[in-house]
Amino acid sequence: MSKNPPNYISTTNACKLCTPLGAALAFKGIEGAVPYLHGSQGCATYMRRYIISHFNEPIDIASSSLSEKHAVYGGGANLKLGLMNVTQKYRPQLIGIATTCLTETIGDDVKLFLREYEKEVEGEKPIMVQVSTPSYNGTHMEGFHNAVASVVAALAGKEGDEDTSGGVNILPGFVSPADIRYLREITDDFSLQATILPDISDTMDGPAAKTYEKIQPGGTPLSSIASMGNGMGSIEFGHTMSDDSGGVLLARKFGVENVRIAMPMGISASDRFFDHLTRLSGSPIPEKYRGERGRLVDSYVDGHKYIYGKKAIVYGEEDLVVGLTAFLAEIGVMPILCASGGKSGKLAEMIRQATDDLLPEQPQVHEGMDFYDISELAESLGPDLLVGHSKGYPLAQKLSIPLIRVGFPIHDRMGGQRILHLGYRGAQQLFDLVVNACIAKKQGDSSIGYSYM
Amino acid sequence: MELLKEREEQIHRTGEQPFTLSCNKDSLAGAVSQRACVFCGSRVVLYPIADALHLVHGPIGCAVYTWDIRGALSSGPELHRLSFSTDLQEIDVIFGGEKKLRSALLELIERHSPKAAFVYSTCIVGIIGDDMEAVCRQVEKETGIPVIPVKSEGFMGNKRAGYTAACNAMARLIGTGETTGISPYSINILGDFNLAGEIWLIREYFERMGVEVVANITGDGRVADIQRAHGAALNVVQCSGSTMDLARMMEDEYGVPSIRVSYFGVEDMAQALYDVANHFNDPEMLERTRQLVKEELQELLPKLEFYKKALKGKKAAIYVGGSFKAFSLVKAFRLLGMVVVMVGSQTGTEQEYQELAEITDPGTIIVDDTNPLELTSFLEEKEVDIFVGGVKERPIAYKLGVGFCDHNHERKEMLAGFVGMLNFAEEVYSSVMSPVWRFTCQKEKGREKMCSIAVANPKE
């Protein structure tokens, strides 16, 4: 079978989102922050709608609301007006400003505008962090990682109250609120002071409240970011981002050792994560997690025959695809196509590294894919499973195969924000999902009405 | 709540001062408007044309956020449900996107054999200066199908400007089709988008009256129907904001008169049918219409009684895209015995807001182009029981412990027509009456302290 990806000029049903969306989500994980898009009004509104449909949470993203005259004469005045209005209404500690294709193309110098703003506007001002996110360059993941790097570049230091010095920095990338809560629990159980950047666990999955919070409580505390330079080490999830990531910046600027590991999905990748925590904390893996791991192995054994050799197509963000592929390979599912809209150039190599000892044959791995491409390849590959976000549903429906919903966006089910992907506990949930989807398919396809499967 | 100064004149309280309301202007920077942009306006109006190719010329965002979002159903082809983009990259921005646009169009037209192609311009296309007209003309010549540029750069105004761009695009199709054999009792349905199959219901009413529907504009729409739409005797325009421009153009160019209607709520639905029957001035048709309305009401009204009893006196707030819908909703809530305390829209005109002020009770808040913080303060001040809006309004309601009814593009329930009124009542009822509210922080008694939750803080 040809291993060449389809090569079309047009994009149909993209398997990626635009750069500023990722930046807005990353800023949303900073304490007291309001994301702000310097562009026309539509961008902010579209992204809010898209994000709300997944998280079922408010997300206020401000906009410069540029009009025709600003596109001609520059958007500086509206940027400043917008920042003033956001400051007055939201009283944020930080405004995270991401550009859009419009303002990048007209050549607005946001850094200059912010310097002018600093001089022109009196009174107390929030911290301004800006990131360049032209949507014609990269995907939402570049936007996400670049925003994190901008926050680190602007705010990280060696300021330290004692209790945060010597902690560990975790840069998990774009994972779910449930994942972040779990990471916090793990580091707490290792008695490690951890700064998780960004942290959307409360801001994008908040409890019922008495009123509408202008800015949801939670997010990575600014004071913790300010002392990230004191950390004894950073752990960064993912291998496909650029060499100017937050973790790398911390290493370069402050000499904080940075370890990049694959997203800890499945046992092998989670083991590596726990090994690093053991090394950094000097403590053995807490009993609780040995228990989780043990039960997970036990369930792998109990369930292996339902899934062995099932063929899966995995799609989504590159690092998520690497993590999922490694997990599927270790439970005996055969990934046959790994696809992403991202184009890091590293995806195939990362998948090979993660699965070389497990898979008799490497799957097809293609970057820059859309769902038209995936669908075309799927016709001849005959998959048993799709693994990815909600936008694969039309394909799953066409092929009459189960879709294992993971990642973002989950637009057709409740609880996208509560899906746990990481660590032993995340692997347990994913494993049960995969096995049960296969069992349900077999049960549903049979007319007998088995109540034992 | 303290308002931003620039926002003050976009809010009115019925009866408390003489009516003035500023509207139809650009959204205020930093105010977190609930509005989208010009592109959005064009995209939502044209998108339901199911046998046309809809190609978004720009970077990926605009196409991917509008992929199949509207739930506009088709009885045949479903090309409109795919999201096509030229996915412009940096190199295209530097050297221009015309070549890529042309190749993408040729590729997609060959692949899907659409009956026409709409090409939407996005923000940067307006900046890099791609000559979309020229590319479209060229491809039209090569492929033999209408290839129509839609001037929808996001920054070129607000959502209303996008409606106009969509109408201009459709105007290029109208007048190019054959009109022989069209009944003198014929209409075009403008401004219904066939959410949840609503246009099928409306068409069935018109058929029972003996009226031929020439073109659906645009729900379950077809290019060939739109091309012959000028042969219809009457344009029946719902959602006047989005397609009234087209009706005006058709009146000027082809002498097709138009009436404005709404299919939401019992009164407006019945009025719409009577207005059409009266226009044709045919006693038999009028009789058939009376019969239809009678049959439908006999079926509906007894079923509504239950909901009226349960919902009497409950307070409702409305924030929708177009203000036409707001009128119908005000009346629909009245029919249920409920009280409307706030009503607003993204794109209403001064006249529409004035009319809203006239039909609402004293103290009702009327608002144009609002935002989450204002909405929050209104919902809290008025102690609302149910909020009607779209996806972006939903979490605002829910965080405040207020029920919610989705009356936007993404709903899957039919809310138009007589049966739609029943569905609407049912949906309002099922949110307002749910037992879950007793646990929310606003309503819970005796366990208030359960509502104060510390967030994860590593410094504790």
Image (cartoon, rainbow, N blue to C red):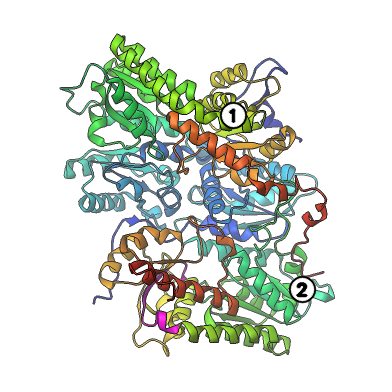
Which image quadrant is residue B331 in?
Answer: top right
What is the x, y in percent for residue A238? 53, 75
Is residue A213 visible in the rendered structure shown here? no
What is the x, y in percent for residue A239? 51, 77
Q: Which residues are magenta?
A: A304-318
What is the x, y in percent for residue A10? 31, 56
Q: Residue at x 35, y 61 (%)?
A: A395
- Quadrant of the drawing holding the C terminus of chain B: bottom right
- Looking at the image, which is closer to me, B25 or B305? B305
State the mark number for residue A158. Answer: 2
Q: Residue at x 34, y 56 (%)?
A: A11
Q: Nearer the viewer, mark 2 or mark 1?
A: 1
State the mark number for residue B308. Answer: 1
For this view, does A378 lie left or right of residue B59? left
- Looking at the image, which is closer to me, A405 or A236? A405
Q: Residues within 10 Å of mark 2 (few under 14, many from 20)?
A: some
State the mark number for residue A385. Answer: none
